[in-house]
Image (cartoon, rainbow, N blue to C red):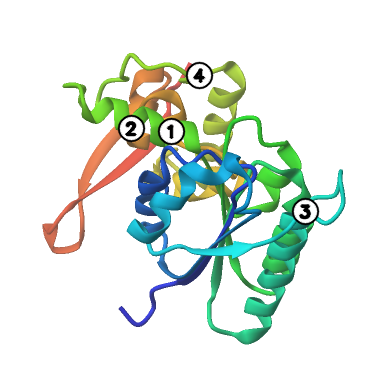
Amino acid sequence: MENEIKLAVLIDGDNIPSAYVKEMMEEIAKYGNPTIKRIYGDWTKPTLSKWKNLLLENAINPIQQYSYTTGKNATDSAMIIDAMDILYGGRVNGFCLVSSDSDFTKLATRLREAGMKVYGLGEKKTPEPFIVACDKFIYIEILENRTKESESSTTPDKPAKKSQVDKITPKVIKMITSTISDLADEDGWAFLGDVGSLLQKKQPNFDSRNYGFEKLTPLINSIGKFEIEQRDSYKGKFKLIYVRNKKR
């Protein structure tokens, strides 16, 4: 596809567990073609040994970065320098920064200022500034849950009995309600695709999978405060889903 986003995937090996690298790469492939894949760390350290067997399997290029000074994160510096070199090289139009470290907040902001699409992947402990600096942020715990789910008989329409599933709070419901209102026509209906896109802009880490649902439709349906309607698309080739807030 000519319009497919070419992504540079830069992984902070010191800050990300290796257990779900396959799932991470599958997730990244949804958003573009990962043409550059690099992982940074001091490969002389035994703590990174689990990564080594996975690099060839996933065609990830390891970048050796020695820790020259105690207390200084040389890996972060190398990753940031490489990101800027790639940016100015003009070979990609998007970045995927894989880390739970807030030190990459400024980098994500700078890349977006340059017109790059920026995706972040990290654990739920990731500080808020880094999350909101990305266009979209995906929690690794989602991928862990998906792996466990594939081993069971759960369906996309029902939340799986999994650990680390977030509660649908009144704050989340309020955000969905206001987003529908922002996009609603005169009858209160909003196209669900537009609702999902605006939710993502308002909160980059918003993802229905955080709440145990594979898609936004069953998540909204489970709350009970919204109406959902299916309509035929142009020429009736597929269905379009619209949603509106229930009248009090």
Between the residue at mark 4 and the residue at mark 2, the CA separation in whole angstroms equals 19 Å
Task: Give the CA distance from mark 4 to mark 1.
Answer: 15 Å
Q: Tell me where residue 89 appears, x and y as whole percent.
A: 62, 85
Q: Which residue is mark 2?
A: 146
Q: Earlier in the sequence, mark 3 or mark 2?
A: 3
Q: Can see residue 1?
A: yes
The residue sitting at 33% across, 32% down in the picture is 146
- Do the residues under discs 2 and 1 have CB atoms within 8 angstroms? yes
Callout 1 secondary element:
helix
Residue type marked 4:
Ile
Residue carrying label 3: 67
State the residue position of label 1. 142
Contact (Cβ within 8 Å) of mark 4 with mark 3: no
- The Cα atoms of the two marked residues, 3 and 2, are separated by 35 Å
Q: Which residue is mark 4?
A: 168
Q: Nearer the viewer, residue 71 or 94?
A: 71
Q: Nearer the viewer, mark 3 or mark 1?
A: 3
Task: Mark 4 or mark 1: name the one nearer the start of the chain.
Answer: 1
